[in-house]
Structure formats: structure tokens, C-alpha cells
Image: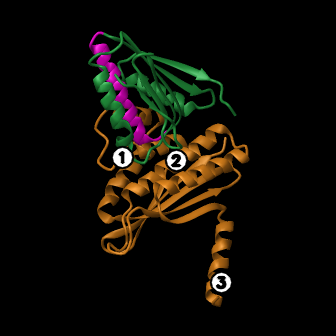
Chain colours: A green, B orange
């Protein structure tokens, strides 16, 4: 299947979904004007993917900013991974947060509480 | 220039100074305007070497408040004005930043907004976390793209109670002011 490879903008993240290489990542800022317009193609791609997925899917999330409308869309993406597990496949979410960003750490923990997918929380050193 | 107008401009400038207002805007709140002002504020806070968490909180809260206006603001006069207009003020004291937005709103929304803000104001940190999780995992994104999470998020990030006011414009419309204080770390 074709890959998703979207460069980041000031308000949308860099997204890679690649079945061949097994790279799944969302990185940067997510505060788009129209949340559905940005996330619907990603959700459609994942809907196709879960019909014929890899044995294991690891999704890396490394966000600098997330608005509340996006948090709902990211939740929908995580539900797709939940579906993989229901179908007997392996899936994992790696949530990266800067060591000085307590709010982003909290968001990761809250997702982990409501999504039935294994979460790994990884702290990294803030750049500035 | 007419003397009255000169007085107005000078008074306006003095009022801004006296109230520690660093940034003011009135007009259409478009996506480009949101990008411009958040970038401006972000650069300003960076230049002042404000603590990273404070920078992020100010940025996040500005985005939530402005996206609220761009989605929900009404117009005073249904014919001549576009939707999504409002004002934005960013003020700064030694101890905090204050983000104030104002926009015209249909009277029928007032009760729902009051109930929402009063509710998040009285919840504890842990209760807010639970409410956020509940809202996150239920319901769909509304037609306008809001997720019903905005006030919870603003309240949690600011660590302060949200302050609001509704001033009557006419029988159908009010001017809605939302004020958020973010303490410096």
C-alpha cells in the first residue's frame, strides 16, 4: 500500500505511516484550523492498513503543542491501534515528552488510561 | 487631525500602558491571524528567556481562546460584519501573563458557557483530569471542530480560575469577555 509522508507546517505535524519500513510517527505541532480535514485521510489510511497490517505496529508520538480539537483526533488514531490488538496483532504507542513539559507528560498518561494499547513514556531533554 | 481624535489616541495609548497591555488586536480572527500572534508572542517570550513551561502555557491558551472566537463568535449586525471577529489582549506584570479575549455572542449561548466555566472553576486538579479523560474518550468532534475540551484545558494549563463577563449589546447579543491568568514560574 502507498505510504503517508507529510511534512510539518506551523500548525500541523510531520506524519509518516509506512507499512514497508514499519515506521509510524507523528511529530511536531498539531493545532490545525480544520482538524477533520487534516486527520481524516490519516484515519482512512489506517482503516485500510488494519485490514492487512504488519504483525507489530509501533507508533511514535512526539508533540510540541497539541490543541484540544487535535487531542480528539489523535484519540481516534489510537483507537485504530486498539482495533489491531482486538484482531490479535501487536501494537504499541511510544509517547515522547520534553523533560520540562509536564503538561505533555500528563496528556500521555491520560491517553494511556483510556486506550487499551501498551504505552511507553519516554522523556527527552528539552532543546532550549 | 481633530483634537478629539488626538485625545482618543493618546488616552488609548495611556490606558494600554497603565494596564500593562503588551499586545492588542481587534478584527477578524482568522487562521493566519492566530498563527501570526501566537508566533509573535512565542518569539517575545523566548527573547525574554521566560521559562519553557510558561511559554508553552501562554501559547496553548492563546490558541484555544482564539480558535474559540474563530469558530463561535457572532456579529453585531447580521449584514455588515463577518463572523469570527473579536479582540485579543495580552498583558504582562512581574508575576503573570494575562490573556483576554472578547467577542460578540448570541444570548442563547450565555447559560451554557456560564455553566461550563463555573463547573471547571470549582473542580479539583484530579477531577479536571477525570473530566478531560471522560470527554476525550466520548463523543465526536462537533461540526465546527470543537471538542468540548477547551475550558477544561485552559483551566488546567493556567492553574487559575477562569474569569468571564457578559455585557448586554441588545436583546439578542452580548459581548463576552474571557480572562485567563498564567502565573510565571
Q: Nearer the viewer, residue B122 or B66?
A: B66
Q: Nearer the viewer, residue B101 or A32?
A: A32
Q: Residue at x 71, y 52 (%)?
A: B94
| Label 3 chain ID | B
Q: Position of residue A86 (x, y in %)?
A: 27, 14
**Which label is found at residue B61?**
2
Magenta-highlighted residues: A66-88
Secondary structure of the residue carrying numbered label 2: helix
Residue identifier under label 1: B146
The image shows residue A40, relative to residue B182, as above or below, that is: above
Secondary structure of the residue carrying numbered label 3: helix
Residue identifier under label 3: B7
Q: Residue at x 37, y 30 (%)?
A: A75
Q: Residues within 10 Å of mark 1 (few under 14, many from 20)?
A: many
Q: Position of residue A103 (x, y in %)?
A: 54, 33
Q: Residue at x 39, y 61 (%)?
A: B73
| Label 2 chain ID | B
Question: Within the image, what quadrant is residue B25 found in?
Answer: bottom right
Secondary structure of the residue carrying numbered label 1: loop
Q: Residue at x 52, y 47 (%)?
A: B61
Is residue B80 located in the magenta-colored stretch of the structure?
no
Task: Name the magenta segment's main secondary structure.
Answer: helix
Q: Is residue A81 left or right of residue B163?
A: left
| Label 1 chain ID | B
Labels 3 and 1 positioned on one and the same chain: yes
Amino acid at each position: 500500500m502507498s505510504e503517508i509522508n507529510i511534512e510539518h507546517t506551523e500548525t500541523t505535524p510531520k506524519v509518516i505511516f509506512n507499512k514497508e519500513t514499519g515506521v509510524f510517527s507523528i511529530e511536531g505541532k498539531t493545532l490545525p484550523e480544520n482538524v477533520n480535514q487534516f486527520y481524516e485521510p490519516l484515519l482512512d489510511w489506517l482503516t485500510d492498513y488494519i485490514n492487512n497490517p504488519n504483525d507489530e505496529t509501533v507508533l511514535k508520538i512526539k508533540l510540541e503543542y497539541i490543541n484540544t480539537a487535535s487531542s480528539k483526533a489523535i484519540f481516534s488514531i489510537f483507537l485504530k491501534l486498539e482495533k489491531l490488538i482486538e484482531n490479535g496483532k501487536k501494537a504499541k504507542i511510544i509517547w515522547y515528552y520534553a523533560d520540562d513539559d509536564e503538561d505533555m507528560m500528563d496528556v500521555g498518561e491520560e491517553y494511556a488510561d483510556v486506550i487499551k494499547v501498551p504505552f511507553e513514556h519516554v522523556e527527552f531533554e528539552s532543546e532550549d | 487631525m481633530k483634537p478629539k481624535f488626538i485625545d482618543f489616541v493618546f488616552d488609548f495609548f495611556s490606558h494600554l500602558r497603565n494596564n500593562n497591555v503588551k499586545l492588542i488586536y481587534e478584527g477578524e480572527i482568522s487562521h493566519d491571524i492566530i498563527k501570526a500572534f501566537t508566533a509573535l508572542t512565542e518569539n517575545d517570550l523566548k527573547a525574554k528567556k521566560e521559562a519553557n513551561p510558561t511559554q508553552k502555557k501562554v501559547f496553548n491558551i492563546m490558541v484555544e481562546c482564539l480558535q474559540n472566537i474563530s469558530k463561535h463568535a457572532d456579529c453585531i449586525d447580521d449584514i455588515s460584519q463577518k463572523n469570527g471577529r473579536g479582540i485579543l489582549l495580552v498583558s504582562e506584570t512581574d508575576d503573570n501573563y494575562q490573556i483576554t479575549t472578547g467577542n460578540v455572542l448570541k444570548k442563547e449561548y450565555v447559560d451554557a458557557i456560564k455553566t461550563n466555566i463555573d463547573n471547571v472553576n470549582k473542580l479539583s486538579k484530579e477531577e479536571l483530569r477525570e473530566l478531560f479523560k471522560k470527554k476525550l474518550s466520548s463523543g465526536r468532534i462537533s461540526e465546527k471542530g470543537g471538542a468540548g475540551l477547551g475550558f477544561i484545558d485552559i483551566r488546567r494549563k493556567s492553574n487559575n480560575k477562569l474569569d468571564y463577563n457578559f455585557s448586554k449589546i441588545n436583546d439578542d447579543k452580548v459581548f463576552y469577555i474571557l480572562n485567563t491568568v498564567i502565573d510565571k514560574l
